[in-house]
Image (cartoon, grey):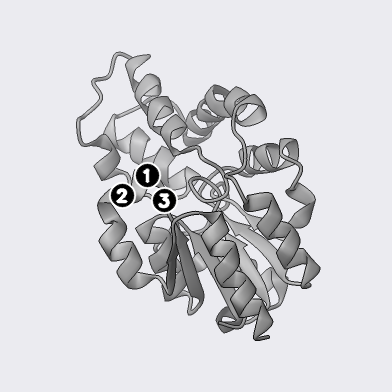
Amino acid sequence: MQFKAVIFDLDGTLIDSMGIWYEVDKQYLLKRGIHVPDNLFDEIEGGNSFIEIAQFFKQRFELPDSIEEIMDEWTEMVEEYYRNRISLRPGVAKLLNLLKQHQIKLGIGTSNSMKLTKLVLSVNGVLDNFDHIVAGCEAIKGKPFPDIFLSVAEVLRVKPKECLVIEDVLVGVQAAKNAGMGVYAVYDEYSKDKFAQIQETADFFAQDFSQLEEKIKEDLALQ
């Protein structure tokens, strides 16, 4: 596949953080004396934006808090983790350097907030590698709608067909396809129940970033 830009998802793709969000959601409800439904995480679409998930919580649990207050509290709850405990997945930094060496534009399309996105990328020393970030705090429809990836491509000034998306969840893979972009999926244990669909939908499936790097090296050699 030929491409001029690579757009990454953040949580579960560049960083191993999905488990933290499951815990935060539970603690947020328990602190208010609200029973955590067994199927809560099935109800939350994996690609919903930060705002959309806050809206869901407010309506689903009839919360008196405003959308902004909900998002602010979540951010406060996980900020320490993003600052001190979350690292890049093995092989990420090496792949980013490879892409920059080949003058490939880099972007991020994430459901997370801009504050947490920039924080975790900064403390891990890779924030400056990215040319543009679109985060879930912006008024954009979440995945599987293509809006978030199309927005990144527009700012990077590349056509959708010239973009490669790296994702870990099914709705993210679907969003990339809906945007008319190529998409490579990378393994994440929190998506194992959707593996068959992910592999069927993505253009390539990698078990880790080492395997992903080898595939991208093959692509770059053909450009």
Residue 65: name its quadrant: top left
Q: Residue furthest left?
A: 38
Say which amino acid is labelled 3.
Answer: Asn
Q: Earlier in the sequence, mark 2 or mark 3?
A: 3
Mark 3 element type: loop
Residue positioned 56% across, 49% down in the render: 10
Quadrant containing the C terminus in the rendered view? bottom right
Residue 72: x, y in percent? Answer: 56, 29
Amino acid, disc 1: Glu
Residue at left 34%, top 22%? 29
Mark whose residue sits in front, 2 or 3: 2
Above-or-below relation of 69 to 182: above
Q: Is residue 109 above or below residue 190?
A: below
Three-letter code for the amino acid on which mark 2 is drawn: Lys
Q: Earlier in the sequence, mark 3 or mark 1?
A: 3
Q: Which residue is mark 1?
A: 189
Q: Residue at x 60, y 78 (%)?
A: 219
Q: Which residue is mark 2?
A: 192
Give how far apart the Cα atoms at labels 2 and 3 are. 19 Å
Residue designated by label 3 = 48
Q: Nearer the viewer, mark 3 or mark 1?
A: 1
Say whether residue 160 is visible: yes
Q: Given contact means CB atoms under 8 Å apart, are the residues at marks 1 and 2 in contact?
A: yes
- The percent position of residue 15, horizontal first and vertical second, equals 56, 43
Q: Position of residue 220 (x, y in %)?
A: 66, 78
**Callout 1 environment at 10 Å: few (<14), some (14 to 19), or many (20+)?**
few
